[in-house]
Amino acid sequence: MKNQLFSTFFFFAFLAFISFSCEKDTTGDPDNESELITTVSITFTPASGAAKSFKWTDKDGAGGLAPVIETIVLAANTSYTISTTFLDESKSPVEYITAEILEESNDHLVCYAVSGSAPTVQITDQDKKKNPLGLTGTIKTTTAGNGSIKVSLKHTPDKKAATPCSTGETDVEVTFPVTIN
Amino acid sequence: MSFSNIIGCKYGCFLGIMLLFSNYLLGQELHSSCSLKLQMAVVDPQGKPLAYVNVGVSGQQIGGSTNEDGVLIFKNLCKDNYLLQFSRIGWEAYEVTFLIEKDTSIQIVLRESGIMLDKITVLGDGDKLGKNTIKEILDLESLRSTMGFGLAESLKQLPGVQTLNTGASISKPVIQGLHSNRVLILQNGVRQEGQQWGSEHAPEIDPFLSTKIQVIKGAGSIRYGGDALGGIILVEPPALRREKGLNGELHLQGMSNGKLGILSGQINGNHSFGNLPVSGRIQGTLKNGGNLHTPDYFMNNTGVREENFSWMLGTEKNNLSSTFFYSRYFSILGILKDAHIGNLTDLTNAIERGRPLSDGAFSREIGRPQQQILHEFFQWKNIIDLENDGHLEINLSRQFNRRKEFDAHRNFGTLPNSLENPNILFEITTYRGEVDLEHNWNQDFHGHIGIALMQQVNTTDRGSLIPDYSQWTGGVYYTLKYKKPASLWELEGGIRYDMNKLRIDDVNPKLQDFRENQFQGFSGTLSSVFHFSNAGFLVFQTGSSWRTPHVSELFSEGVHHGSASYEKGNPYLIPERALNNSIHFEWKEGKFKIQSTAYYNWINQYIFLSPQKEAVLTIRGAFPAFNYSQTNVSIAGLDGNMTFTLNNHWDFTFQAAMVKGRNITGNDYLIYMPTNKVQFFTTYYLNAKENATHSFIRTQLTHVAKQGRVPADFDYALPPDGYLRIDIEFLTHIKNKFFPDIELGVALNNATNTRYREYLNRFRYFIQEPGRNLVVRLRIPFGNS
């Protein structure tokens, strides 16, 4: 009797161990890459003449191949309207992220920081709360020379802050070399 | 040898909690060889005599129990060293070595353990954790007063253990300057297998399920693995109840900072079914806290939830005892929102601010970023008593760990409000099987031989930080200990061989050439104990251990958003190997008690993140790049404490620790080494009243220096200034009609609301440490224990 009880205990114990329904490994999507921005493109449209686009592209994401950066070439003493777009060119068809930024415009801000001969960017568009957004703007070149424009896309910035561009989380930060002829 | 003697020897080895001993020399000179008398009086901390305490002498046929007056006398002793072992069910066992050369009278104080002595625990940890292993035991009182703060914070009480924090909610233990994969954590004797490689991955253990936590420093024990370069943490649940009946305890805690509440309880029972005794326990913990505050502002999104549950079921028959243990740990941890940054510009901005954008407010809501961690543990442990030959232990276990991390990050658009799709999801399942045979060659030689096998599968279902992999490890070891009862020396040595087979299951073509990896090597320890007097001993320990590079070190690649850095693994890493050398000293005499450990450890091919000259340019801007590299390092340190008991009312403890880590090859300091720390504890014991006993008030002053030993050009900001922190604690035991022993603790942590930052907190760039915190806790035992 004793031994029977004991072996019964062991039998159940062993069963419990074998068939214990713990949490199991679930198989999700193997590599659920988060969505990506690969390309920043700025289109410069002069009052008269053809529009020109310049791209900063890193199709394979962080690491791997180095990004391809085009130099922005502008004419001196000219006014341009600019329009900045963000794309995911790693997907086919290419995904236009600008549309989503417009949709969530209150939470985004495109900032432009310039150096050298590159002229300052005036933001002309607004988000749904009438705060600056920065997808479009104007610039006016003066003398010929070299410089750079740094474009950053801020997520959830504090647009009421003294320097809104130093708040929020940076989703994009790219620098274009600029040549003004 | 009787069973109780075994307990006495193995259980209480080397750290009796309180020993007031007075050595009344009776002045009788030079007795003829074997006619000496030893009178022992055993009392409780209040000085009341304790009857029925078993007293044995290791290796000799002498023994007995104390009488009603707590007294036992051994006669006809020869002039020699005697290892005395005191034990009584429900009380902490204690052992002490005595040189008897005159007629001697001693007084021994035993303390209530609250742990039922249990064959399983005792046998499981017998000889291997004798004096030869340099270790620290966190006493029950310190454990209970800190367990509301988590495992690592509890361990911080010990000299030589520090923590590596990520904000206020994530804390990892650091032993001898090392952490993560270099520190093993064992739950009930089984290695915890989760995602312990990450510095922001806290150990997944509920401290409330344990009544005993030990830290083995350095390469002291190869039984648990050959890769514990820093040390080993043993978390042991209390043994099961062995007498018929039911008992339990309830813990209630509240903290003002974060309005944190904890409810924890357990019920123990024992019942005989026919002739089969079955013991069981059910235990659980709930924890809920909101945003913590610093002296100046709230820390947004720093709430915490924990839901833990465990049970244990065991039986004992003839020579066999068998136990099942299951535990489930689940926590949700909020990560400080302001510490989540997109790129280096954001990091620079955040460091410049040095504080959150707004003062924040209290909230219990935990949003993104957050971690959700589940750890499930199931174990079947069997111990067969081989009578005089020792014990055979068979240990089978399964662990499952699921870690979900939710970023506050998306490249564009708003974040989903739901927490359905984590950005990172790791799942790791581990099966382990271990067999250990304790073998007594004769009275003086005790050996352990064992084998440990592991099979593990890790899948990364979201995020591509580390690839999917499977791993098989196998290890065999042999340890031998020499301990002759009257000898001043004890010796112990061990050798272990481990093999590790790692297969990368990921389809990523970049990993094509590194699918199959295999590592193998030996580790070993050698230690000796020298009893230089009745009151003290020295331990000399040397050991070599090695560690396989972890998958994260071999193959991780990507931006680490916590630190705005680009980290790149290196598949060509080879195992790192350490040579540890330590000297440990313990001395107790009269009113003084001193213990100290000095160590010097070399690690060859130490794996670390080496900063690269070229930043990695991404569409988010440039990130500083770090590659996993190898170098030779040395880590030296000294830690210890000293207690002076003035009288029945006052005692004073001084505790200090320092660590110095050098990159020998690079001729520079190592980053993130603990800062010099000194602590001073003053305790005032109140007179016992009828309804309130064991009462004390303790003040703890902690001074942490500014870290001066930092590598050049490595960190984003200078180390923070040193600080002085004051903590005050009051504890008493209340007796009433229904509950015989309610423990009430009230503590005021950071009493002066000091603003400070901790060098070893990875969020120190963004935020201060938490401010003043009032903690009230109750522990209510019930039932007949």
Image (tube, coloured by chain):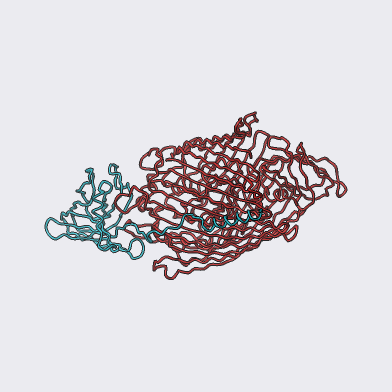
Chain colours: A cyan, B red
The outermost residue toward the top is: B690
The outermost residue toward the right is: B32
The quarter of the displayed image where residue B466 is located: bottom left
* Viewer-proximal residue among B470 and B631: B470
Is residue B542 left or right of B465 when viewed as pictured?
right
The quarter of the displayed image where residue B241 is located: top right
Residue B524 image offset from top left, x and y in percent: 62, 62
Quarter of the rendering occupied by the C terminus of chain B: top right
Instruction: Report the label total.
Output: 0
The outermost residue toward the left is: A48
- What residue appears at the point 45 percent right and 39 percent down from the top-left corner? B258
- Residue B658 in view in this figure: yes
Residue B217 image offset from top left, x and y in percent: 60, 53
Residue B606's place in the image compared with B95, above or below, is below
Residue B714 image offset from top left, x and y in percent: 44, 55
- What residue appears at the point 27 percent right and 49 percent down from the top-left corner? A108
The outermost residue toward the front is: A1
Residue B627 image offset from top left, x and y in percent: 44, 61
* Viewer-proximal residue among B423 and B510: B423
- Residue B624 in view in this figure: no
Is residue A1 left or right of A57 when viewed as pictured?
right
The quarter of the displayed image where residue B54 is located: top right
